[in-house]
Amino acid sequence: MDPVSLAGLGLGAASITFQIFEGIKMGYGIFEDAADMPEHCESLRLRLRLECTRLLDWGDLSGLSEPENHSKFDRKLKANRATIIALLSEMKMIIDKIQKISLRSDCILLPGIDIAAAQGTSMAKELHLANGKEDLKGVDIEQFCSILRPMEDQLNNKKRTLLTRSLRRVVDIGQGIADVAKQPGRIRWALSDKEAFQTHVRRLKELTDYLHETLGDHQMSILIEQTKETCMAMLQMTSSISEMKELIEAVEIATSHASIESETRAWLPLGDFVDRQASVSESVSTISILERRETLFTQLTEFRYHVASLQIGVPKNREVTGLKLQGRELDNLKFDHTRATGNGRTPATYLGAAAWVEWKAYRITRHKDEHGKFYYGPTPLATANLERLAAILHIDKRPTQFRVPLCAGYFDDEINERFGLIYQVPYATPQLAETISLSQLLLQQNSLPPLQSRIRLAKELVTSLYFLHAVNWLHKGLRDESILVLTQNGRPDYSQPFISGFEYSRPDETDLTTTAAPDTWAVYAHPDYQGFDRKTYRKTFDIYSLGIILLEIALWKPAEEILGFGQPSVSTGEKNKSPGTMDESQEKKVYSKDSLQDLKNIRSRLLIDEPSLLEQVRATMGSRYHDAVKSCIGGLEYFNLPTEADETSPVIATLLQQAYLRLVVDILRSIRV
């Protein structure tokens, strides 16, 4: 008797469904255990991983993952149990078909899932979804998963349990499966029909979509969170151009042969459609509907692949060198020195549109060209780094969530020994709109924005850094001067800030030579990035700098004033006085920016020695905002990761991404004013 008939008789729906569910998990596991996988099959296996993840997430929510929850499955999904059994049964048959056309055992094509049992494949525990790249030595997984505890007042026990399980699944993605190359066993890849494989995977995806639709709205919201984080973890785990290509191909497989809307929304809820950013010279209407209707995940993946493909020093790479403006091209650039603030940013117009120029100084040295002639100018490495940075900032097919302006090109100001990077006011902003930096706003009298505006600004900034780090893009110079706000008729719009000041930025690559940021904004620099013994730059240093900016936004004062670097004037103190601020009459120690020790002590002062500084934030912005700031400044230690962890490891980077999402982004997003 078939499973649906049994369900119709009421013969233990949960028991029957659980058996089929476990069989499907075993079937997925076979593909992970199989050896000798050809490179051209990697994207296919990746698609199976994605669909398996979606199935496991559904199993958690429906009550099938754990035997003790089977009664909940019977009770909650009773009306849909026949449909669910039918869907799972078809999924099992499809996986059998995929195995028959792609795997072999001792030169005999696999007849189906029964072989899995014969091989002893165990899928009762969580499926590891990605090949391991690093050991998780020193990482206390129980402690790491406890990062949900600060959110206990916002989450009920059930949702907290499900999100904890989702965190563990992300850990599984990072930890990876056993090294099957060393112990290949009897099952090997032998793909005979790639087109049929793709067709079957698309059907698996449709069936999983139908399973998701059996959940209620609340469960679906949890499922969206889990799927989003799993996909972002997979993006973080890609460490080579070839892996990125496979991930892009997997996305293309998922979105082919169906409408863009139904496909992308279903398997990548993270990727609600995003409009591609249009350059000033390109109207939004010229972008095709298909190009605009992309998922955020697709844009992130393609952007990261594009950045990795830009090779430093590749000769005559038009994509990199074609952005340099020379000769008469510079006639299109008009400076407005009347609005210059002397902060390294000069207002301008370019091709008639609003723009500004940011400067990056270099040192003149003597070089020999390819013809053997000597010349003076910036080093070839400095030029190559600048060209690559301009090319990255020029990529217009990128998420608006980056909050990064578009670079129209660059030029060499030889007289002043500096490069100029030309930025355009983004997103077709009216020409009359101007930009003003956060540092300027903090110094304006009577400029304290409403609490709601400050929280909105903070939310946008932490989200921006989350997505920049998702593609391994380090800023290296975050400070109040690099945060730009658009103004219209003198009124700042805090809902759409932009992060600029990328002259020291770079992709997070271990073999890339970089230039350290100057000491002028040392109060924003992590103590481990100061002094002669400074460590290589890493993501937590960006996060630390953002924490200082969040501190400024909370108290609406420059960081130097908050931290006592130079005695503030009475008028400055009075105009910025806000709830929770200490009495200005109290005696305060004055610190010096010339003292390396004073600068390096900022972190310990905020976290340990002077807790009253962050208590001002709690009194002004609330406990959740306070906790997010503290997590940013605390870094790895407060993210429950070893302080000596290698942040360039894809595994550690994945866990760091999860911790930052939980303890900073989600915390701030949960604030309601």
Image (cartoon, rainbow, N blue to C red):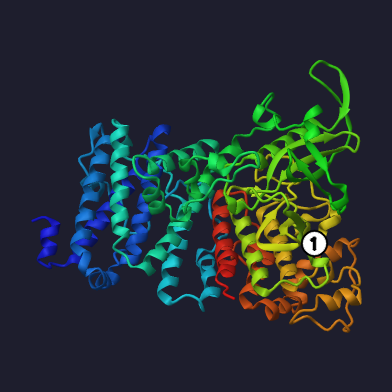
Instruction: Work out whether residue 382 can be spotted.
Output: no
Q: Nearer the viewer, residue 4 or 25?
A: 4
Q: Which of 193 and 165 is in front in this view?
A: 193
In terms of secondary structure, where does tag 1 sit? helix
Residue receiving disc 1 = 439
- Marks counted in the figure total 1
User: Which quarter of the picture shows residue 415?
Assistant: top right
Name the residue rendered at 68%, 52% in the picture.
Answer: 538
Quadrant showing the C terminus: bottom right
Q: Position of residue 20 (x, y in %)?
A: 22, 56
User: Which quarter of the picture shows residue 451?
Assistant: bottom right
Crowding near the residue tagged with mark 1, few <14, some 14–19, many ≥20 C-alpha atoms within 10 Å: many
Quadrant showing the N terminus: bottom left
Name the residue rendered at 27%, 40% in the picture.
Answer: 98
From the viewer's perspective, tell me whether residue 47 is left or right of residue 628: left
Q: Position of residue 371 (x, y in %)?
A: 81, 15
User: Which quarter of the picture shows residue 44?
Assistant: top left
Q: Which of 11 and 344 is in front in this view?
A: 344
From the viewer's perspective, tell me whether residue 673 is left or right of residue 412: left
Name the residue rendered at 81%, 72% in the picture.
Answer: 562
Q: Position of residue 239 (x, y in %)?
A: 55, 42
Q: Position of residue 352 (x, y in %)?
A: 74, 40
Instruction: Work out whether residue 1 can be spotted.
Output: yes
- Above or below, 61 relative to 616: above
Residue situated furthest top in the rendering: 371
Tag 1: amino acid: Ser
